[in-house]
Image (cartoon, rainbow, N blue to C red):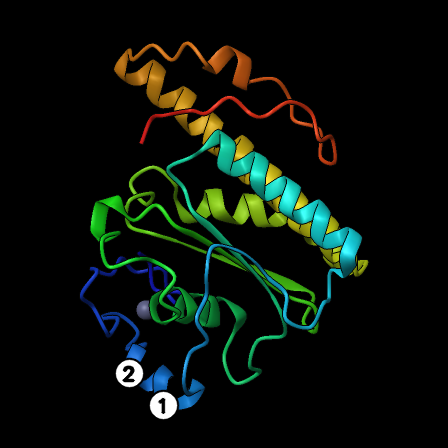
């Protein structure tokens, strides 16, 4: 995991970033008791609306069908203004009981996407199990896909766009790994078809690589 401030690598047991001093304990003091985050969509304020929530759950289902090893939590709500959104997402990921006790270290392939409608921003944190493959640049690229929709206040579209971009990014990474290590991936050809943003389509073929 990387420090949300300075991007320095952190170990799983790190409670403080050695480079910039960001400290989970201090964040606890500032942010209070963390909410419990489960996989799926958390939209307490019904920001997405009924149709939007359905759309986002569909996109989430397609993503998780493609990557059954990856568990996603999507939080749509205004983050506390006292910390940057990226820091809040990191704190939620670490403190929200999202990852089970069994999902430690390299088996933690959880993804948390946080969308803040007040700031019109999104942030993403991933588990250690994905970090050897997915870098901050990959995450930034996925987040960029939703920037326009966020600016326009189209929250559900933004969520779907980020999920689709993340799906495409992960498929690209899997493809490069397959070439590098010479590991055949029979599903890759099928999986390389573009996925329509709002196209319910067929269930995505799972890519079992991690
Ligand atoms: Zn740091």
Give the vertical position of 77 relative to 158 (above or below). Answer: below
Q: Nearer the viewer, residue 8 or 12?
A: 12
Give the vertical position of 144 relative to 203 (above or below). Answer: below
The reply to whether callout 2 and callout 1 are in contact (CB within 8 Å) is yes
Q: Is residue 145 visible?
A: no
Q: Can residue 116 be seen in this view?
A: yes
Q: Position of residue 131 (x, y in %)?
A: 32, 45
Q: In which quarter of the image is residue 79?
A: bottom right
Query: Crowding near pointer 1: few (<14 within 10 Å), some, many (20+)?
Result: few
Q: Does the residue labelled 2 lie within 8 Å of ligand 1?
A: no
Give the vertical position of 183 relative to 153 (above or below). Answer: above
Residue identified by numbered label 2: 25
Compute the Cα span from label 2 to label 1. Answer: 6 Å
- Circle 1 sits in a helix, a strand or a loop, which is it? helix
Quarter of the picture holding the N terminus: bottom left
Q: Where is residue 24 in the image (x, y as percent from the top left)?
A: 31, 77
Q: Image quadrant of ligand 1?
A: bottom left
Q: Where is residue 85 in the image (x, y as percent from the top left)?
A: 53, 70
Q: Answer with left or right where residue 61 lies relative to residue 133.
A: right
Give the vertical position of 12 relative to 64 (above or below). Answer: below
Residue identified by numbered label 1: 29
- Circle 2 sits in a helix, a strand or a loop, which is it? helix
The residue that appears at 56% across and 44% down in the rendered structure is 142
Q: Quadrant of residue 153?
A: bottom right
């Amino acid at each position: 995991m990387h420090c949300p401030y300075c991007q320095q690598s952190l170990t799983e047991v790190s409670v403080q970033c050695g480079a910039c001093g960001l400290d989970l304990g201090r964040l606890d003091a500032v942010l209070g008791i963390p909410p419990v985050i489960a996989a799926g969509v958390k939209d307490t304020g019904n920001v997405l609306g009924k149709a939007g929530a359905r759309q986002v759950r569909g996109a989430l289902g397609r993503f998780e069908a493609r990557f059954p090893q990856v568990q996603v939590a999507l939080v749509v709500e205004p983050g506390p203004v006292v910390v940057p959104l990226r820091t809040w997402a990191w704190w939620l990921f670490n403190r929200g009981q999202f990852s089970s006790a069994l999902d430690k270290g390299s088996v933690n392939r959880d993804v948390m996407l946080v969308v803040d409608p007040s700031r019109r921003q999104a942030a993403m944190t991933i588990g250690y199990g994905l970090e050897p493959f997915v870098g901050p640049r990959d995450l930034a690229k996925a987040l960029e896909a939703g920037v326009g929709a966020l600016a326009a206040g189209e929250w559900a579209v933004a969520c779907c766009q980020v999920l689709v971009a993340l799906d495409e990014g992960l498929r690209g990474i899997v493809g490069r790994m397959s070439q590098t290590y010479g590991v055949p991936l029979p599903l890759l050809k099928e999986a390389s078809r573009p996925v329509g943003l709002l196209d319910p389509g067929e269930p995505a073929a799972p890519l079992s690589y991690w």
